[in-house]
Amino acid sequence: MRARAPASSANLGPGFDALALAVDRYVEVEVERASRLIVRSEGEGAGLNDDAGHLAARVAIDVVGHDRLAVTVRSQIPVSRGLGSSAALAAAAAAAAGSREPLAVAAHTDGHAENAAASVLGGLIVATTVRGKVMPVEMPFDPQLVIVAIVPDRPLSTTKARQLLPAQVGLSDAAFNLGRMGLLLAGLADHRLLVREAGEDRLHQDYRSPLFPEAPMLLSALVAGGALMACWSGAGPTLLGFCPVATGPGLEQTARGAMADAGVPGRVMLLHAERAGLVTGDAARLPPLADDGTIPPIPRAAPISPPDGVPAVAGRGVTPFGVRPSRGAIYDFDRPE
């Protein structure tokens, strides 16, 4: 069986460990029966761990109950860059191996319910665990927003980044983040309401800056170049600038110039919110490998502009002033496969 899951960007500034957005870079996993374990990989992370220690192999073996499998991984998601590569890989591997609860598997494996939920369900997701169960809710996201991502060549361990965070925070900092998250959710639902302050945070970004000291300057450059809001992606080092569709190409150029000025090697990606989430079967196939060893992005249709005066909010029954429980499902870690 074949499955594909999108990357995700978590936190988005003030939404620490609670908020994630699926974006249009993907990992494809195919699991087939074989006489012995065979692991192959191409694209991002190719050849790093093509054996029983590969995350996709571990997940597939756990789901199936034996290791007589051929596991093929093809990825567009940069590894250890704050784009949810582990959660997406775990979700795709679980689905390809036949799991009925890929979200439960991915959340348990990766440890981040929000990344796992975004990769499985797609869209902008608020997720948390309640009595050991993942509870995801989809939030409105304006399709007129695109994301310019600064992706440094340097990896950053989520574990190492988390070690810098304080065990306790003050009441004023907690209240600050709650207020900023309200601004953020309103602005992501309707880009006309998105303001720079919506990306501010007092729980994690500043504490992690010693691991990426160029980050504050690059975030400021994104805002100066036209981003409505800029923030870290997950634990970093990827940085994000949210802007209207028309501003995206110009902000890409600004981001490349800012990276050069800061002496930060890496790449810039123009990303879009991914609505589909986890996909299985032939529809999960990614494009063939390019000559440079990467897997090209999937072509996108041009966005449809809404009529004048109508907020540009994505569909599936979501309005600017409402939320939709994600398929009405609660996923239980303890449910046997």
Image (tube, grey):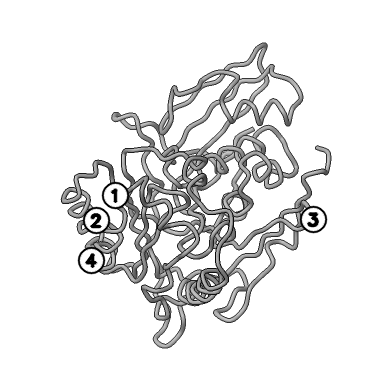
Q: Vertically, is 203 above or below 158?
A: below
Residue at x-position 57% and y-position 56%: 17
Circles 2 and 1, Cβ within 8 Å, touching? The answer is yes
Q: Is residue 249 above or below residue 104?
A: below
Q: Residues within 10 Å of mark 3 (few under 14, many from 20)?
A: few
User: Outermost residue, top direction?
Assistant: 35
- Name the amino acid, label 3: Arg
Report the residue that reaches farthest toward the bottom: 309
User: Which quadrant does the C terminus fall into?
Assistant: top right
Q: Amino acid at mark 1?
A: Val
First reached walking from the N terminus: tag 4 or tag 3: 3
Real-space Cα separation, disc 2 to disc 4, in angstroms = 8 Å
Residue under numbered circle 4: 225
Q: Earlier in the sequence, mark 2 or mark 1?
A: 2
Question: Label 3 to label 1, Cα distance in Å?
Answer: 40 Å
Identified at 64% across, 32% down, the residue is 1
Q: Is residue 181 above or below residue 253?
A: below
Q: Which residue is mark 2?
A: 255
253, 296: nearer the viewer:
253
Residues tagged 3 and 2 counted as in contact (Cβ below 8 A): no
Residue 111, percent from left and from top: 63, 44
Disc nearest the viewer among 3 and 2: 3
CB under 8 Å between discs 2 and 4 = yes
Q: Of the numbered discs in the image, which one, if any, rests on residue 268? A: 1
Q: Residue 302 vs residue 310: left or right?
A: left
Q: Residues within 10 Å of mark 1 (few under 14, many from 20)?
A: many
The residue tagged 3 is: 131
Whether the residues at callouts 3 and 1 have beta carbons within 8 Å, the answer is: no
Q: Position of residue 312 (x, y in %)?
A: 45, 76
The numbered mark, 3 or 2, whose residue comes first in the sequence reads 3
* Circle 4: element type: loop
Cα separation, mark 2 vs mark 1, equals 7 Å
